[in-house]
Image: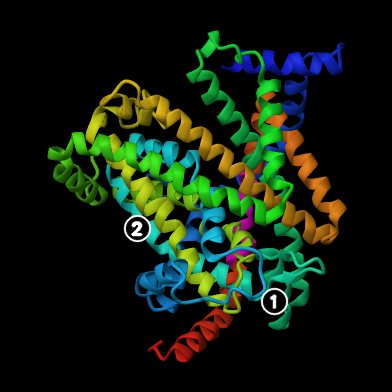
């Protein structure tokens, strides 16, 4: 695919710049950017040896926060689950005239569309191919713990959001770091952390949220339309242009437009993927108890994995962090736009996000792989990983199932793109103000990079942007620790007014 994508990029750029080749441009940018990307990746994903295992400190930071918030909020991720479902169903918070732009359900689907993506297919497969079935157990545990982190960051996202003059809403970590820490007598620290976060999310959105997703959608489209023989194999610029137009049609209307699309797209793509996966599981139902037993026992007594239980635990937690982004703070931007007068209500709703993304969808992916194609001999041998492993698992039941998977992956990529456009735009708005020109400027830049993503092989740029996303956790989780007393007061007051025990 590398050659076809480079040729597609050449077709576009040679029309614009006849004296240059796309390969040369890609290589020049990549070579210039690689030292910066390498330094950023090494900083963000710095590891320390623990026995035979390399433990990434950023993952420890995220998981430590999730455990701390779970304990301090008295297992809110479990005892508040039913209440969260009631709110989404409209049975609790009915403030239709409250400030905000979207409903609880629309805010949830927008956030879910940003987290449910290619990672639900690839990260689970990678975790199992490297750590065995036990990695899925720790992935589920991390998802459950991450629900508490989502509760904290999304409650703060609503509490400290900004209602702009035109009625639109701006919120997320930039605003609760700025305003919240100012209330705690730390205005300079809050402002610095907010700017740091805004810069990270702009670059992260353009790179990992836009270019990478567009590239993956293009690759999947070419694969299902003939591979090297596909009429689009050397027309990445054309596919990118079409995708950019489809993206622009949604994001130009802001969060309301994005929410309308995601509220329909997310249930469809999730049901399509889960429904297809359940067929595969159903065909192999007799082996289901054994598969579940493997997941549990292998989590504590892994075989063939260097580093043993700790290595499998770290692998599962790391893949969960990549999948549901609890602690990254990005989804708090979408949740901040909800129509409500009670910040805590959206904190409850936000807990459903890692549950859907990790506990449900990632678990189903793991079961499909373990029931069909998993073999202990594949551990660490590099023969199968990522989407190829998941695809072969689906194909083991019906040959045409990989086509359904390809459609799902493209939908996952597209939904992630439109959600992350909003996240990046809010970072841009925080820096340049909620002016119409700033929103249009960012959206224009974002759509341009959709095309670039389909026509380029800028690996270093994508590595850098991926690191930028996780670099946000350094500031965000720090802010969550400092602002947790605010969340606890909000929660206690909310329960008191509902007449329930805290």
Q: In the rendering, at what x and y percent does residue 11 appear?
A: 75, 13
Query: Residue 181 shows which numbered tag?
Result: 1
Q: Is residue 369 visible?
A: yes
Locate the C terminus and report the quarter of the image it occupies.
bottom left
Residue 285, compared with residue 98, is above or below; it is above
The first of marks 2 and 1 along the sequence is 2
Q: Quadrant of the N terminus?
A: top right
Magenta residues, start to end: 466-477
Image location of residue 79, percent across then percent down: 35, 75
Q: From the viewer's perspective, is 298 left or right of 462?
A: left
For mark 2, give the secondary structure: helix
Residue 329 on the magenta segment = no
Check disc 2 and report the residue beneath it.
Answer: 141
Q: Reply above or below: 370 against 231.
A: below
* Secondary structure found at label 1: helix
Q: Quarter of the image holding residue 486?
A: bottom right
Residue 298 vs residue 368, the one in the foreground: 368
How many neighbours does mark 1 have within 10 angstroms: few (below 14), some (14-19), or many (20 or more)?
A: many
């Amino acid at each position: 695919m590398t050659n076809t994508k480079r040729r597609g990029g050449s077709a576009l750029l040679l029309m614009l710049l006849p004296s240059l080749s796309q390969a040369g441009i890609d290589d020049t940018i990549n070579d210039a950017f690689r030292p910066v990307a390498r330094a950023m990746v090494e900083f963000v994903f710095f590891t320390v040896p623990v026995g035979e295992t390399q433990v990434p400190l950023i993952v420890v930071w995220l998981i430590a926060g999730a455990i701390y918030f779970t304990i301090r909020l008295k297992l809110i991720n479990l005892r508040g689950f039913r209440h969260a479902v009631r709110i989404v169903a409209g049975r609790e918070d009915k403030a239709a005239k409250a400030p905000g732009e979207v409903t609880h359900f629309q805010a949830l689907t927008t956030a879910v569309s940003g987290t449910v993506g290619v990672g639900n297919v690839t990260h689970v497969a990678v975790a199992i191919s490297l750590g065995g079935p036990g990695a899925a157990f720790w992935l589920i545990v991390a998802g459950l713990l991450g629900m508490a982190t989502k509760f904290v960051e999304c409650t703060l996202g609503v509490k400290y959001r900004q209602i702009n003059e035109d009625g639109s809403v701006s919120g997320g970590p930039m605003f609760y770091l700025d305003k919240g820490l100012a209330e705690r007598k730390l205005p300079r620290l809050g402002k610095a952390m907010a700017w740091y976060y805004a810069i990270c999310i702009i670059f992260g959105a353009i790179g990992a949220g836009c270019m990478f997703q567009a590239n993956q959608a293009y690759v999947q489209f070419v694969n299902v339309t003939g591979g090297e023989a596909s009429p689009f194999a050397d027309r990445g610029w054309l596919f990118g242009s079409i995708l950019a137009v489809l993206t622009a049609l949604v994001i130009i209307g802001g969060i309301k437009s994005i929410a309308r699309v995601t509220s329909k797209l997310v249930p469809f793509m999730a049901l399509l993927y889960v429904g297809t996966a359940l067929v595969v599981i159903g065909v192999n139902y007799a082996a289901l108890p054994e598969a579940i037993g493997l997941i549990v026992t292998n989590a504590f007594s892994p075989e063939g994995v260097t580093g043993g239980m700790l290595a499998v635990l770290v692998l599962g937690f790391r893949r969960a962090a990549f999948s549901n982004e609890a602690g990254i703070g990005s989804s708090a931007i979408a949740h901040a736009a909800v129509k409500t007068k009670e910040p805590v209500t959206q904190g409850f709703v936000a807990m459903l996000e890692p549950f859907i993304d990790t506990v449900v969808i990632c678990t189903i992916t793991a079961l499909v792989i373990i029931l069909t194609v998993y073999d202990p001999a594949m551990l660490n041998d590099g023969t199968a990983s990522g989407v190829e492993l998941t695809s072969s698992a689906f194909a083991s039941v019906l040959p045409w199932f990989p086509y359904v998977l390809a459609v799902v992956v493209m939908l996952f990529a597209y939904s992630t793109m439109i959600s992350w456009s909003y996240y990046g735009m809010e970072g841009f708005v925080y820096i340049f103000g909620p002016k119409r020109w700033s929103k249009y400027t960012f959206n224009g830049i974002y759509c341009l990079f959709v095309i670039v993503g389909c026509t380029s092989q800028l690996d270093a740029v994508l590595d850098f942007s991926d690191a930028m996303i996780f670099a946000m956790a350094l500031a965000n989780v720090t802010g969550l620790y400092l602002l947790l007393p605010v969340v606890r007061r909000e929660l206690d007051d909310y329960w008191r007014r509902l007449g329930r025990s805290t």
